[in-house]
Structures are given as C-alpha cells and as structure tokens.
Image (tube, rainbow, N blue to C red):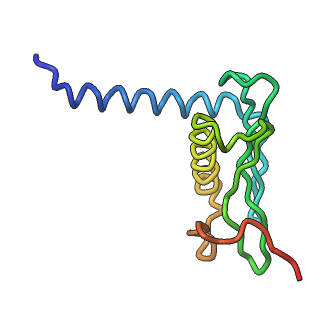
Amino acid sequence: MELDVKQLRFGLVEIKALEFEMSIQENITREEISHRGGGVELDLSGFGYEDEYLSAYQNYLGGGMRGAVANSCTVEDWEMDERLVRLASELCEYYDERLYELELVDEYNEETTGRLVSYPGL
C-alpha cells in the first residue's frame, strides 16, 4: 500500500489539531456559560506560560442579545505572541462549541461576530 504525501500531511494536521483541542479541554480551569454570556478560563501552564491564564468571554448586551466573543490574558502584550493569539482563537471556538452543546444559541445570537463586546453606556 502506497501512502499519498498529501494525505499523510493532512492526517498529521488533523492529529495536531485534535491534540491541541484536547489539551485546551484538559487545561480549562473555569467554565461559566449561560444565556446571558459567560466565559471559559484556560490555565496556560501546560503551554509553557507558568501561572498565566487566557480566557474567552461573552457579555450580555440586553434585549436578549449577547456581544461578540472576546479574549483576555494575564500575559503582558499577549497579542504580540503568535502562539497565544492562536490559542485565543481556539479558545473562542471552544466557547462557541460549548454554547451549541448547551443549546444556548437562538435566532438573536447565531452570529455575534462584528457585534460590540460590551455595551458602551451613555
């Protein structure tokens, strides 16, 4: 049986993505999700950042609408670290998946990309 190089590379990418997802799930320290938003917190120690945390969260805007999913991190200037930015994106995807699993997505909140993260006030 001959192995196709493209299939082999794609398979490795799938395995790496699965390992990445599994390591995110294994390092979640807090998860609070409701119809009014919430968040998940990831302990970054397992990713080489000792005693640091990354979170994905979503605020309630009012009127049944939730804001865009955003990230927060205890690492200073984390947005300049390519690995942390990738982890933040993956954590947002994990949060979105959990919303669907918990059946908290309705017609007002199917697409929150582009919404404000929080209500700016008056």
Percent position of residue 58, x then y: 73, 59
Percent position of residue 44, x then y: 72, 29
Percent position of residue 66, x then y: 71, 69
Closer-to-camera residue (57/85): 85
Closer-to-camera residue (52/28): 52
Vertically, is 50 above or below 110? above
Vertically, is 28 above or below 94? above
Question: Image point 77% across, 22% down: which residue?
Answer: 50
Percent position of residue 40, x then y: 74, 45
* Residue that lies at the very extreme toward the right in this rendered image: 122
Vertically, is 71 above or below 112? above
Question: Image point 53% across, 30% down: which residue?
Answer: 20
Q: Which of the 4 image quarters holds residue 76?
A: top right
Q: Quadrant of the N terminus?
A: top left
Question: Image point 62% across, 60% down: which residue?
Answer: 103
Question: Image point 16% across, 21% down: which residue?
Answer: 3
* Residue that lies at the very extreme toward the left in this rendered image: 1
Q: Quadrant of the C terminus?
A: bottom right
